[in-house]
Amino acid sequence: MYDAIVVGARCAGSPVAMLLARQGHRVLVVDRATFPSDTISTHYIQQRGLARLAQWGLLDKLIATGVPAIKRMTVSYLDIVIAGFADPIQGIDATYAPRRTELDAILVEGARDAGAEVRTGYTVSELIIEDGVVVGIRGSVAGGEIAEERARIVIGADGTNSFVANAVGAETYTKVAAECFIYYSYFSGLSVSEFHSRIGDKQQIGIWPTHNDQTLVAVMRKIDTYADFRADVEANFVKVAREILPEFAEELVTKGKREERFTPMRYPDNYRRQSHGEGWALVGDAGYHKDPFTGLGISDAFDYAALLAERVHEGLSDQRPMAEALADYQRERDEKSQSSFEFTCTISTLELTPQLLAVFRALEKNEEYATDFYAMVGGGMTGEEFFAPERIAKLLGANA
C-alpha cells in the first residue's frame, strides 16, 4: 500500500513524487516511457523554474550537462523590438533551454534518489475505483502481467491526454480556443546565444540555444494555414524566417544544418480541468494547459507540483482533510496562474490588442520597464504587478 501513486514521470510527475518522498511518504511513480527519452516541448525554463531546481538540489546537475546559459532576450512585434533581460530572480541570473532527454532524466533520478519507487516502461490500464473513490491502479511493464497497486491518492501527471483525467471524467471549466500551430527542429552551425521571440504578420519565429551546440528554431502560424504549411514544411519554415528575420534566415540556409526531423506541435485548446476528487488529483498539463507561445509550461509544472505536494502532504499527515487541501491546491493554482493565462491567450493570437501594442511601443524605448517586462516573463514579478494601471500609465506617459 502506497501513500501516493503518480502516473507520469516528467516535469510535473517526478517533482511531486520526489517532494512527497522527501516528506517520508511511500510513493510509486510510473511512466510508459523509459528515460532518457524525448518529448515535444518548448524546452525553455524561466528563472522561477530554475529557482525550483536549485531549491531541490538539481540545478547544478542540469548545468553540468553542458546546456548553454541564456542572458539576453529579444521580443519583437513587427517593427517594435524589446531587448534586455531580467535582473537576478531568487539568485538566478540566466535561463536555460535543455533538451528533454537531459532534463527529464535528472527529474526521474531526483525522485528515485528521494526514495520514490520508479517504474518506467509501465502502462496503466485501469484506475481502481471503489464506491466512487480512486484507490489505486492496474497496469504492467511491457510484456508483464497486469497487477494492481493501491494508494491513498492517485495523481495524474500524464499530460494533456491524461489517462487519469479521462478515467475520472474530469470536466473542463475554462477553455480558450488554440489559435496557432508550431513546427520546430534543431540546427548546428548557427551563431545564436540569445533567446528570440519575433512576431511578424500573423506568424512568429522562436530561436534559442540548447544542448550539443545546437539551436532550437521554431515557427508558429495561424491554425488555418496548417494544411498549406505541411505540404512543404522545409520551404515554408524558411519562408517564415525570411519574412521576419531575413539576416537570420540567410545564416540558417547557408550555415545551418538541420540535425533532426521537423516536429509539429498542433496543441489542444487552453484549458483548466477539475483537478481533484475523491482519491485523485491532476498536475501539470493533465489539469491545466496554455499555449506554448510563452514557454511557461515547464516552470508552471514545477511550481504547481510543489504546491500539490504541500497540499497532499497536509492530507496524508492528517493536518487537515484531504478534500479541503486539494480544493485549496486547485484554487491557489488558478489564482496564481490567472494573469499569465490571460497574457498567454492574448499574445498567442499573434495580433496585439491596441492597449498591448501601446505598451510594447513604450517598452522599446524604456530600458527600466523592459527589464521589468522580462522580470514578469521570468517570474520575478506578477502580471498584476507589471500591468497595474498606475505603472502602465507612468510607462505610457514617460514615452508620450
Image (cartoon, helix red, strand yellow):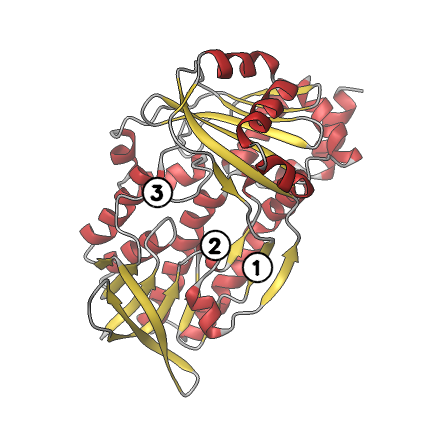
Separation of residues labelled 3 and 1 (CA atoms): 25 Å
- In the displayed structure image, the side of residue 253 where residue 69 appears, left or right: left
What quarter of the picture does the C terminus occupy?
top right
Q: Given this view, does label 3 or label 2 mark the residue nearer the observer?
A: 3
Q: Amino acid at mark 3?
A: Asp
- In the displayed structure image, the side of residue 89 where residue 222 appears, left or right: right
Query: Residue 108 bears which disc, if any?
Result: none
Front in this rendered view, residue 34 or 393: 34
Front in this rendered view, residue 388 or 129: 129
Q: Which residue is mark 1?
A: 272
Tell which residue pokes out farthest to the front in this image.
231
The residue at the point 69 percent across, 43 percent down is: 224
Vertical relation: 263 (above or below) 335: above
The residue at the point 45 percent across, 72 percent down is: 167
Residue 311 place in picture, x, y as percent: 40, 63
Q: Residues within 10 Å of mark 1 (few under 14, many from 20)?
A: many
Using the rendered view, name the quadrant where residue 220 is placed. Answer: top right
The residue at the point 30 percent across, 55 percent down is: 19
Q: Which residue is mark 2?
A: 285
Separation of residues labelled 3 and 2 (CA atoms): 17 Å
Pointer 2 or 1: first along the chain: 1
Residue 1 place in picture, x, y as percent: 22, 75
Q: Amino acid at mark 2?
A: Asp
Is disc 1 placed on a helix, strand or loop? Answer: strand
Q: Given this view, does label 3 or label 1 mark the residue nearer the observer?
A: 3
Vertical relation: 380 (above or below) 29: above
Q: Residues within 10 Å of mark 2 (few under 14, many from 20)?
A: many
Tell which residue pokes out farthest to the bottom in this image.
131
Using the rendered view, name the quadrant where residue 3 is placed. Answer: bottom left
Q: Residues within 10 Å of mark 3 (few under 14, many from 20)?
A: some
Residue 168 place in picture, x, y as percent: 47, 74
